[in-house]
Amino acid sequence: MTRRSMGYGSLLRSSPLRLTVGLVVLFALVSLISLGASYLVIRDTMDQSMRADLTQELAGFQAAPTARAVALLVKAEAAVTRSERRILSYNAPDGRHYGNGYLALTGDGFRILSLSEDKELSEWPYLAISRPLHGGQLTIAISREQIGDLSELFLNILLLSVLPTVAIGLTAGLMIARRAARRIGAISDTLDKLTEGDLTARVPNLSGRVDDLSAIATQVDRMAHAQQSSVAALKQVSADIAHDLKTPIQRVAVMLNQAREMPDVPPRLEDLMTRAGQETDGIVATFQSLLQIAQIEGGSPKARFKPVDLSQLAATFVEVYEPAAEESGHRLRVASAVTDGALVQGEKGLLGQVLANLIENALRHTPAGTPIDVSVARVGADVVLTVADRGAGIPPEERENVLRRLYRLEQSRTTSGSGLGLSLVAVIAELHDARLELDSNAPGLVVRLIFPAV
Amino acid sequence: MKILVIEDDATTGDYVAHGLREEGHLVDLLTNGRAGLIQASTADYDILVIDRMLPELDGLSIVKTLRGAKNLTPVLFLTSLGGVDDRIDGLNAGADDYLIKPFAFGELSARVAALARRPQLKEQENTLRAGDLTMDLIRRKVTRGAVEIDLLPREFALLEHLLRRKNRVQTRTMLLEAVWDISFDPQTNVVETHVSRLRAKVDKPFDTDLIKTVRGAGYRIEE
């Protein structure tokens, strides 16, 4: 089973990891949104303050009395201003141009027409304000470099805070998921073992704090313990009943034997005692089957299951029953359409019991001269054991009933048999995870047992 | 042989002890598990017949304790429990054979005899003989007097099993276990029909019958 060594596939499907991934994604989204919003707000504020600065600067130039004075001021200012930070441009009324760059107003905004020699432009866009002044046009443009710096800053914040958080969150989630997977694996392994019938299985001591998983583990253990005690009680009860009933039956058998060995027993009495002996054998057989059904249903451990070759077992049983079948006028045949083995996981004794019960059932309930066919075939991933006869069959509405304990069809009340044969087959089939099907053989009965192949 | 029977039911215990004594064995009968364990570990016995459910100490514990103390005396379990699990539990504990109640004395007697012979290692035999019957194990041929008898493989195996245990009763369940390797209690007379087929070939054409029926027990080949 892959349950213990959880692959990454199943790890990714585990709820703790899903939860972590969800939370991390949510956190990252919230961080991105809040960072983005702050960026936009700050950028807006910076934009406005830049605009205010520009307006104030323009106001400074507007204080100059003449165009000439403006030109001189612009010239002086431009000489000490780096064009990548700020561009001043004044188109004087006489047509001359002053400043560290030539800005002109075109239809769709400002355009830098030329820059003074050795000046560089900022890689960022500029924010410009232009006013007519003393017949000329004064334009001041400020690089948005600061805003660029700001977005870089925000990008850094993003890298330094969100990414590590995501990484740490995911790693922690993975670790928690693996821990949980280990504990869930331990619990589900235990449940598997319990289902298989090993009632002594307990969840191994889970390391770590007391939490919901360890609480579940404790509950599983408590349930297993309760189940174990009730099965033990059932076993004790059936053992007690077996002992208390079989001992007197044994005594009766002993007494009958002793009586038969007395000297001068009249033949009629001996005949009666023989029949009484046969009746006690019948009681024992019925009782034995009931006990066996109860034991299997009470949780027979599958730990003793081994691969059993069903076609070989079927051949053996047909061989064992063949002379008896011939004596009662039946033709018992076996057909095995299996070449590569018909291995099923099971208990040989119980599977043999199934074959014996089905063959004896067919011998008992079908008229002389009819065939009984036993076959084992491999169909896909299944091994199918079939016992088919040509007797009266079982009416469809009765097929469920015959699997019930001690149930007998009206027409077979007079024949021997305990009415437990098929119920025992059904119980053994269930223990082996096999499907039991009763069908019409037109005429007759087909009993099919479909086992999962090994 | 010296046999210890530990059985708490007086009727069954007396019956078993009485039957075994009639066969010429020395039998001690105890009804309590604890006393039984003490007796089994202090005195020397050839066979122990132990009931599984006993007062004070159950049969399973007795066998486990004896095996733990390296006491390897063959043990035949008597039990009311007949489940597969019970049988395997019993054999796992160290019992050598297992008999489910109610049983016929013949079955018990045959199994006790089989257990007693178990440790003896047989020398390799190439021919088995009984009366005028000869079984050649190498050429897989059976002859009676001068007449050769054709046997099917399973009939051969059945005859071989009986010949190897000459003069000892083999019960129906013992034959099913040994010849077909299946352990179950058939409701039909399956073993009888196999034996009668074998008889039809081995005994019927001849004057004397080799395979004898032992009433209430099984079959035996007598010299």
Image (cartoon, coloured by chain):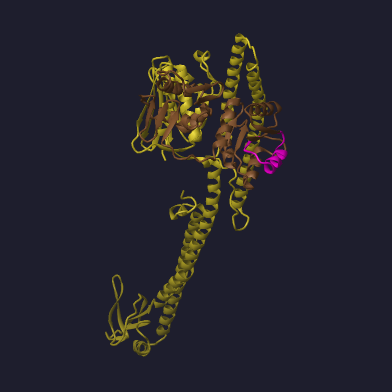
Chain colours: A yellow, B brown
Q: Position of residue A144 (x, y in %)?
A: 39, 76
Q: Quadrant of residue B119?
A: top right
The quadrant of the picture occupied by the C terminus of chain A is top left
Task: Give the mark count.
Answer: 0
Q: Is residue A269 above or below residue B115?
A: above
Residue A213 is a magenta residue: no
Going by the image, does A325 lie left or right of B213?
Answer: left
In the image, residue A282 lies at what x, y percent? 57, 20
- Where residue A7 sits, quadrant-wise, is bottom left
- At x 60% / y 18%, what residue is drawn? A277
Looking at the rendering, the stretch of residues picked out in magenta corresponds to B30-52
Image position of A190 (left or right of A143): right
Q: Position of residue B103 (x, y in %)?
A: 60, 26
**Residue nearest the observer in this picture, A267 or A45:** A267
Residue B204 in picture, x, y percent from top left: 42, 18
In this orientation, does residue A297 appear? no
Is residue B67 visible in this depiction of the protein? yes
> Which residue shows up at 41% across the image and 14% down it?
A368
Q: Residue at x 46, y 25 (%)?
A: A358
Residue A268 vs residue A231, the one in the foreground: A268
Is B41 in the magenta?
yes
Closest to the observer, A76 or A237: A237
Q: Nearer the viewer, residue A260 or A411?
A: A260
